[in-house]
Image (cartoon, rainbow, N blue to C red):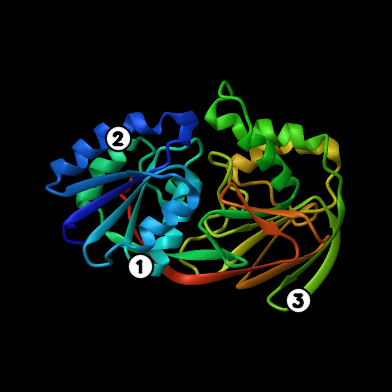
Amino acid sequence: MSAPRHTLVIVNPAARNGTTEAMIPGVTDILRSHGWTVDVVVTRSAEHAVELAAAADAERDLLVALGGDGLVARVAEGALRSGAVVAPLPAGRGCDFVRALGAPRDVSAAAAGLRLATERRVDVGMSGETPFLGVATVGYDSRANDHANAAPGWVPAALVYAYGGVRALFETRSTSITMTTDGAERTFVGWSVAIGNSGRYGAGMKVNPDARLDDGELDVTTVEGLPRWKYPMLLPRYFKGTHIDGVDIRADRGREIEVSAPSGYRVYADGDIVGQTPMRFTVVPQALRILAARA
């Protein structure tokens, strides 16, 4: 990609416990050192982030998302309409999309690396009509997200999802879930369904360990006949991506996944509520233009 004439930094002021705005001067200084012009907009809402990205000029603008995975997903949603390039910077608590890209997790290093970075295209998942980049969840994982999002500031970023998971463990029950993958339906008694585009969430957990951002498919991990007492023991394996055993925790893959029962379960995608079951999940191959340095 040739040097863009204009860079728009889109900021989520609530990311990383409200510390993101303090990163703006350092990031903008680095971007201007590349010879780029820079404007900054601090978002008022998720919808505002979508609007800014949707109004961008595909040939002129580089959209720098300074925030967490939720902001990056909303900037990507707008960029799908405008065709502009998105450069995600790791300014949230988990930054799992940045991890999946193999980009630096230090915000200054990530910004500095953009000058020599090469544009690439990645798939975008769709949870109903809402785009997502990382993972969409139903069941236990969604309840854990509730608590992770509400975690107090003293909980370290790397432990936010573990904190949420422990709290959700005492509130969630296994239930009958009906899931259809590319037309093949099955019903099982289980805890959760995780549908992954990048396959990462929770500050580095590889819930869909074989997921790829450019394979044109979604990966699915279902937790089925697992005893409650085993859940805490799984956490280290999730970070390593070694939790799939084909019995209690199963992996699948497809282009279209539907979770139809139980009805009314909340669906999260990239850490935000996007609706409830029944929900259809699809993938749009190579839909998003990304600029990110390699770590």
Q: Specify the farthest residue to the left.
A: 35
Amino acid type of the residue that numbered disc 3 sits on in the rendered structure:
Ala
Inter-mark Cα distance, 1 to 3: 35 Å
Q: Which residue is pictured at 47% across the width and 32% down the height?
A: 16
Name the image quarter holding the N terminus: bottom left
Indicate the quadrant where residue 201 lies: top right
Residue 290 in the figure: left or right of residue 269: left
**Residue 24 numbered mark, or none:** 2
Q: Which residue is pictured at 25% across the width and 59% down the height?
A: 61
Within 10 Å of disc 3 (Cα), the crowding (few <14, some 14-19, many 20+) is few
Within 10 Å of disc 2 (Cα), the crowding (few <14, some 14-19, many 20+) is some
Whether tag 3 and tag 2 are in contact, CB under 8 A, the answer is: no
- Give the number of the mark in front: 3 or 2: 2
Helix, strand or loop under label 2? helix
State which tag comes first along the sequence, 2 or 1. 2
Helix, strand or loop under label 1? helix
Residue 212 in the figure: left or right of residue 278: left
* Residue 271 appears in the picture as rendered: yes
Query: Residue 180 in the image: x percent, y percent?
Result: 75, 71
Q: Which residue is mark 1?
A: 82
**Front residue (pair 245, 271):** 271
**Residue 184 numbered mark, or none:** 3
State which tag comes first along the sequence, 1 or 3. 1
Helix, strand or loop under label 3? strand
- Give the number of the mark in front: 1 or 3: 1
Amino acid type of the residue that numbered disc 1 sits on in the rendered structure:
Ser
Q: Which residue is pictured at 60% across the width and 73% down the height?
A: 255
